[in-house]
Image (cartoon, rainbow, N blue to C red):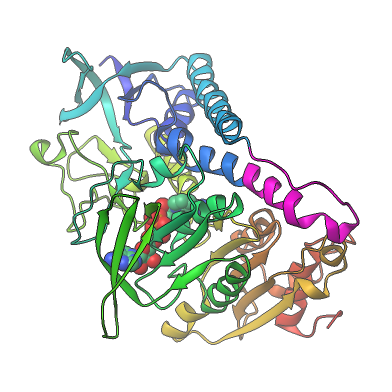
Amino acid sequence: MAYDVIVIGSGPGGYVCALKAAQLGLKTAVVEKRATLGGTCLNIGCIPSKALLHASEQFAHVAHGLSGLGIEVQPPTLNLPAMLAHKDAVVKSNVDGVAYLFKKNKIDIFTGTGKVLGEGRVSVTDDKGAEQVVEAKSIVVATGSDVAGIPGVPVEIDEKVIVSSTGGIALEKVPGTLIVVGGGVIGLELGSVWSRLGANVTVVEYLDAILGGMDGEVSKQFQRILGKQGFDFRLGAKVTAVEKTESGAKVTYEPVKGGDAVTIEADTVLIATGRRPYTDGAGLKEAGVALDARGRVEIDGHFRTSIPGVYAIGDVVRGPMLAHKAEDEGVALAEILAGQAGHVNYDVIPGVVYTQPEVASVGKTEEELKAAGVAYKVGKFPFSANGRARAMLATDGFVKILADRDTDRVLGGHIVGFGAGEMIHEIAVLMEFGGASEDLGRTCHAHPTMSEAVKEAALATFFKPIHM
Ligand code: NAI
């Protein structure tokens, strides 16, 4: 065999798996059809969107956030091409970084579409149609996900007027009006980018809440905050048509509870109604790799598919479509392939929405605990009672901790607030070690920090917060 491991796809799941496998002494290759490494996340997803989120946040902060601190400035002017160039430069440095790490770890790259031919064999077809077969003991399918579109509604995404997240990070001018179909993570993050830069944003969402699946209180308070920022929400609204018009596009939705259809128009429409597992052209069905009803590759607890020696990780398998979940699966699988005991703790996978304020969550929501019949207790603390948050004029949001009523073991943590995406990790580490809210509440936290609100929420969970 030429290789111990060949990984198809170089997104966070695939490239991390390859690096870990090489670090553990396995001869490793990666197949990638894109000209650059890093997959959706680095090229057109997490990384470029965060570059735009940061830049647009700075723009909005300079425009509206400084006078309260006693700083008077002229309204900033936007140089969108330069902002987009910043995003492109960030992408380039990240994808180049992966290429450097591959070189350092002696990982071979095959550029082209990888197809599983069966046990131990993968074909790679380049963009000129030339095909070669590569042999490896283990094959890892890490082909990720793609834009799903609106279920049952044909939409022509031209990535200019009607865009997916791909076009949504590359608009050539700020739309006057933007309709976002889908009030999930992508819709709210990219909606925030363009809202901060001046667009009037309307979000049309099927469910009665934004960020479906998040803790209900978090979702409600976050919706209020975004409402104050100018978002117009149409909830319980099922989009049934999206069409181009002479000046832009129109979206038709029907109230889920019944009633007349409504049509609204905008310069640009962003479709953010989810992603689907991507297996196109990977030869999985032909090779006999079983997929489930939702098109995901079926795997067991050790990432094994129905074909011996073929494994799958990341967005293409069950579980949340998150880069860090894919990365952890990549590491665990590489360890398994190297004869070690790889493991992912699916109970402790944080999720972050990189808006301002951020929304971060780990473990169970209150609704999940209720549904599972778990006896729990709740502790909450608002940032409005935190000194550092007041000093920074960042008092929006709160921390909520859920713990087992009898054992005090922390089962979930939820934060809406400035820096929530960083703060969530102390709850994650606590949960990883099976910690209790009292452990967190008795851990000395530096003063004054936003993180003290996490400690206070923990104090509130097992007894009482000090500053409330
Ligand atoms: P999503 O699944 O988070 O949200 C899609 C929303 O569209 C849902 O709330 C759904 O109810 C709504 N919807 C579906 N059909 C509709 C219709 N006909 N009319 C109105 N609303 C409708 O999907 P999203 O935001 O596209 O993200 C895709 C994936 O990417 C998710 O798994 C997400 O976790 C991941 N992602 C994660 C990020 C992060 O962790 N910060 C950032 C971006 C994406």
Let me know if residue 67 is in the magenta part: yes
| Total count of labels | 0
Residue at 57%, 64% (x, y): give it.
Answer: 361
Query: As displayed, is residue 197 above or below residue 259?
Result: above
Residue at the farthest front position = 246
Quarter in which the C terminus is drawn: bottom right
Residue at the farthest left position = 286
The boundaries of the magenta stretch are 54-78
353 or 363, nearer to the observer: 353
203 or 143, nearer to the observer: 203
Ligand 1 quarter of the rendering: bottom left
User: Residue 150, located in which quarter of the rendered image?
Assistant: bottom left
Residue 269 visible in rendering? yes
Principal secondary structure, stretch drawn in magenta: helix
Residue at 37%, 20% (x, y): give it.
Answer: 35
Left or right, 447 with reference to 404: right
Left or right, 401 with reference to 105: right
Residue 344 visible in rendering? no
1 or 243, nearer to the observer: 243
How far across and down, in percent of the image, does residue 295 sit? 20, 52
Query: As displayed, is residue 428 above or below residue 401?
Result: above
Query: As displayed, is residue 377 above or below residue 34?
Result: below
Quarter in which the N terminus is drawn: top left
